[in-house]
Image (spheres, rainbow, N blue to C red):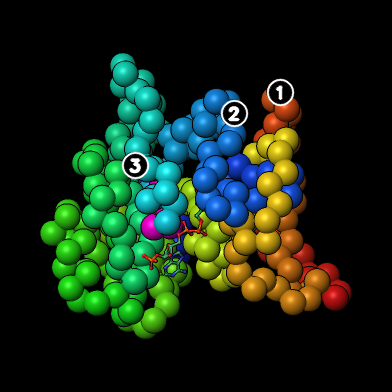
Amino acid sequence: MPRSGQRPFVLLNLAMTADGKIATADRSITTFGSPRDLAHLYELRATADAILCGARTVEETGATLGNGPDPRGAVRRRRVARGLREFPLRVVVSGSGSLSPNAKIWSTHDAPLIVLTSARAPVRARAALARLGAEVWTSPGREIEFETVLQRLLREHGVKRLLCEGGGQLNAALLQADLVDELNLTLCPLLFGGRTAPSVFDAEGFATLSDATRWTVASERRIGNEMFLVYRRVRAVGKLKG
Ligand SMILES: NC(=O)c1ccc[n+]([C@@H]2O[C@H](COP(=O)([O-])OP(=O)(O)OC[C@H]3O[C@@H](n4cnc5c(N)ncnc54)[C@H](OP(=O)(O)O)[C@@H]3O)[C@@H](O)[C@H]2O)c1
């Protein structure tokens, strides 16, 4: 039984350009990593109890947050051998409850789908999401209380390892609340530019160096022209002076 206050280990995975963008400003290019990068995403999914994603990413990329190609069921067997369910639990964030009924995620039913909303979401919208088949969790205030939600995912669904796949707005809420333990960044050899292009951490951000969170490089691998970087959050060390 998890102790009260415990939450899952949260890892974030993103492909980014050399200038930190995760899509072009007009959002016409949202997928730009190599096939190896996609394989890396599926490898990470195969280690996670649940996948977390923002509504816009789900709508724009057609992500269904499943196991990926698995014609002979090898991924499912590997998951079970690791003590995981055959398919990861799917969690989509839509504070206003406006996740589109046309999103591709509604077309697959391998695992339950939880939609996180806030009190900003009209009752009507929440009911529509429930009719489409989602379990709807509503935070009481105007903002989603991610810490509470993470604790609930562990308590009610046994989620010990949660993979967040962006986008930038969702990442920002988690990073600003210091709820991310590991960053998996694939550095792609591209520059997109664009002041409004989605980036890894799309928030006002930290104002001073002493507020900035600190990370250590846990591993780095070059495969072809891409760098696969893993950073771990450093929590015990004192903050830098601003
Ligand atoms: N390169 C990569 O690896 C990668 C990965 C992921 C995404 N992307 C790209 O990034 C872009 C999407 O990023 P994005 O930042 O625009 O969107 P996002 O974070 O995917 O989704 C934003 C939406 O999610 C909900 N949401 C997110 N955080 C919330 C919070 N703290 N509280 C309440 N609701 C929240 C809201 O939905 P409602 O409006 O319904 O309230 C919001 O409009 C897409 O172009 C996608 O392709 C790239």
Magenta stretch: includes residue 119? no
- Whole-angstrom CA distance, mark 2 to mark 3, is 19 Å
Q: Determine the residue positioned at 52% across, 45% down.
A: 28
Q: Determine the residue positioned at 45% across, 69% down.
A: 147
Above/below status of 205 relative to 161: below
Label 3's element? loop
Q: Position of residue 108 (x, y in %)?
A: 24, 40
Above/below status of 20 relative to 178: above
The residue singled out by tag 2 in the image is: 34
State whether residue 236 appears in this view.
no
**Amino acid type, residue under disc 3 in the picture:** Thr
Label 2's element? loop
Q: Are marks 1 and 2 in contact (CB under 8 Å)?
A: yes
Badge 1 or badge 2: first in the primary sequence: 2
Label 1's element? loop
The quarter holding residue 234 reads: bottom right
For this orientation, the residue located farthest to the bottom is 141
**Amino acid type, residue under disc 2 in the picture:** Ser
For this orientation, the residue located farthest to the right is 241
On residue 224, the disc is: 1
Above/below status of 235 relative to 71: below
Q: Which residues are magenta?
A: 51-55
Q: Position of residue 27 (x, y in %)?
A: 53, 50
Q: Are marks 1 and 3 in contact (CB under 8 Å)?
A: no
Q: Badge 3 local density, few (<14 within 10 Å), some, or many (20+)?
A: many
Q: Badge 2 local density, few (<14 within 10 Å), some, or many (20+)?
A: some
Q: Badge 1 local density, few (<14 within 10 Å), some, or many (20+)?
A: few
**Amino acid type, residue under disc 1 in the picture:** Gly
Q: Main secondary structure of the magenta part?
A: strand
Badge 2 or badge 3: first in the primary sequence: 2
Q: Position of residue 64 (x, y in %)?
A: 34, 42
Q: Which quarter of the rendered picture does the C terminus lie within? A: bottom right
